Image (cartoon, rainbow, N blue to C red):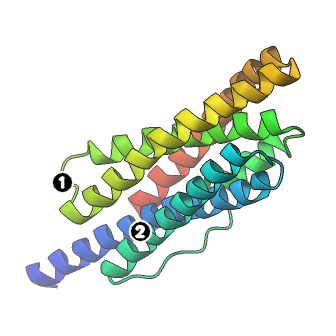
Amino acid sequence: MDSSQVTERARMSAVDKQILIFSVYRDAELRGARLLFNLIGHMKDGDSQLKMAKHLADETRHAWLWTRRIADLGGTPLMLADGYQRRLGLRIGVPKTVVELLALTVVVEERAQSRYMAHAALPNVDDETREVLKAVTEDETWHLSWIEKKMREIARADGVEAKADEAIDRYRSIEREVYATLAADEVELMRT
């Protein structure tokens, strides 16, 4: 094998790794959109309907941005049977109240924002990927703000403010454990 073949094999490996990571991001955005789609039926006030529809549109646009980035790299999205949202759902179960659903959404949005910011800070991130990361990170800031504010508003109105804080703390703890397993699995996949 000559040096150009070695370089091509290494490049393809790097592209395959990008496609895997971007597929993980895409899967999380699609599953997040599904959570929001379910939530929109439980939040009847006009303000929630407007913001939830915008948030839902953002999540599906994020999935499209990752899909397009994968296609631009010459790939197709990988279908993940055991992605972040699925693992989290298996550990948490089904939240029973709107406040719990919103608390879970806050925790998931925090991870998305953190992960995108960490990725953008890596050396050698190409300009096209950096643009996608910038776009989705900006949206996550707004998502976090309005969802947490709405969760606290509903919790206050229902007299369950302490339960909102407990739900966020519990979900953050579980999420850290789930994310640690996902991160370990990703490191292992990246070695191949």
Disc 2 from disc 1: Cα separation: 20 Å
x and y percentages locating residue 17 in the rendered image: 38, 66
Q: Residue at x 29, y 61 (%)?
A: 129
Q: Residue at x 49, y 59 (%)?
A: 25
Q: Residue at x 26, y 56 (%)?
A: 130
x and y percentages locating residue 99 in the rendered image: 79, 33
Residue for badge 2: 65
Is the residue 145 above or below the residue 56 in the image? above
- Toward the viewer: 159 or 69? 159
Could you tell whether 158 is left or right of 14 in the image?
A: right
Disc 2: CA contacts within 10 A as few (<14), some (14-19) or many (>=20): many
Disc 1: CA contacts within 10 A as few (<14), some (14-19) or many (>=20): few
Q: Tell me which label, 2 or 1, sits earlier in the chain.
A: 2
Is the residue 171 above or below the residue 12 in the image? above
Local SS, label 1: loop
Q: What is the residue that sits farthest to the right in this orientation? A: 96
Local SS, label 2: helix
Q: What is the residue that sits farthest to the front in this orientation? A: 46
x and y percentages locating residue 7 in the rendered image: 16, 75
Q: Amino acid at mark 1?
A: Asn
Q: Quadrant of the N terminus?
A: bottom left
x and y percentages locating residue 70 in the rendered image: 39, 75
Q: Nearer the viewer, mark 2 or mark 1?
A: 2
Is the residue 57 above or below the residue 40 in the image? below
Q: Amino acid at mark 2?
A: Leu
